[in-house]
Image: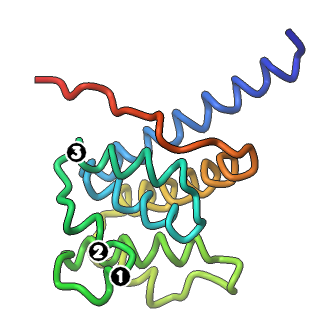
């Protein structure tokens, strides 16, 4: 085994820990999944879309909201808190378009405590990293199954 293989595993483990910690910091597993699904839609990451839609269902998310997520701003299905999270996640994902607008950040800061806002930002950053890994390495969707829900 080469040193590069070990480093790759170490980086993957660190990214996994970052993602899990950020998602836990949001305190709402379904919201965390909505955020990562939306970023994955914008990045066209089929592997992550397959994974996180399954995880969202396992977290209790409805089919209707998952299907409508691509048009969340035009539907009545999302709360103000969810809308703020989705809007900020989109701005972070599309930061190459210029920046995260002040009003987008402000709306999120109004409905999230500081630690939750930090978790939201880190969750968006982590999924964007995962999307880029999955896309660049051609990870194939379809095989992922969520862990069995604990009783």
Q: Disc 3 or disc 1, which is closer to the eye?
A: 1
Asked if the residue under mark 1 is in contact with the one under mark 3, i.e. CB atoms within 8 Å, the reply is no
**Where residue 3 appears, x then y in whole percent?**
88, 16
Q: Quadrant of residue 14?
A: top right
Alpha-carbon distance for marks 2 and 3?
Answer: 17 Å
Q: Colour mode?
A: rainbow
Q: Secondary structure at mark 2?
A: helix
Alpha-carbon distance for marks 3 and 1?
Answer: 21 Å
Q: Secondary structure at mark 3?
A: loop
Q: Secondary structure at mark 1?
A: helix
The residue sitting at 54% across, 88% down in the picture is 101
Q: Is residue 80 above or below residue 40?
A: below
**Where residue 70 appears, x then y in whole percent?**
39, 76
Asked if the residue under mark 1 is in contact with the one under mark 2, i.e. CB atoms within 8 Å, the reply is yes
**Where residue 81 appears, x then y in whole percent?**
24, 73
The residue sitting at 22% across, 79% down in the picture is 80
The residue sitting at 87% across, 23% down in the picture is 4
Residue 68 shows which numbered tag? Answer: 2
Q: Quadrant of residue 51?
A: top left
- Left or right, 25 with respect to 102, comes to left
Q: Nearer the viewer, residue 95 or 50?
A: 50
Task: Bin the neighbour count of mark 2 within 10 Å (Cα to Cα): few under 14, some 14-19, many 20 and up.
Answer: some
Residue carrying label 1: 71
Task: Bin the neighbour count of mark 3 within 10 Å (Cα to Cα): few under 14, some 14-19, many 20 and up.
Answer: some
Task: Bin the neighbour count of mark 1 within 10 Å (Cα to Cα): few under 14, some 14-19, many 20 and up.
Answer: few
The residue sitting at 19% across, 68% down in the picture is 64
Residue 47 shows which numbered tag? Answer: none
Q: Nearer the viewer, residue 63 or 83?
A: 63
Q: Quadrant of residue 79?
A: bottom left
Residue 59 shows which numbered tag? Answer: 3
Alpha-carbon distance for marks 2 and 1?
Answer: 5 Å
């Amino acid at each position: 085994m080469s040193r590069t293989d070990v480093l790759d595993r170490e980086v993957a483990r660190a990214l996994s820990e970052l993602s899990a910690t950020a998602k836990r910091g949001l305190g709402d597993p379904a919201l965390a999944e909505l955020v990562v699904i939306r970023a994955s839609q914008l990045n066209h990451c089929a592997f992550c879309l397959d994974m996180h839609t399954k995880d969202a269902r396992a977290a209790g998310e409805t089919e209707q909201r998952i299907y409508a997520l691509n048009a969340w701003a035009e539907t009545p299905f999302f709360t103000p808190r969810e809308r703020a999270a989705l809007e900020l996640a989109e701005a972070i994902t599309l930061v190459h378009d210029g920046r995260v607008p002040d009003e987008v950040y402000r709306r999120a800061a109004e409905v999230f405590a500081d630690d939750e806002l930090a978790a939201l930002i880190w969750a968006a950053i982590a999924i964007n990293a995962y999307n880029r890994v999955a896309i660049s390495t051609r990870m194939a969707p379809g095989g992922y199954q969520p862990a069995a829900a604990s009783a």
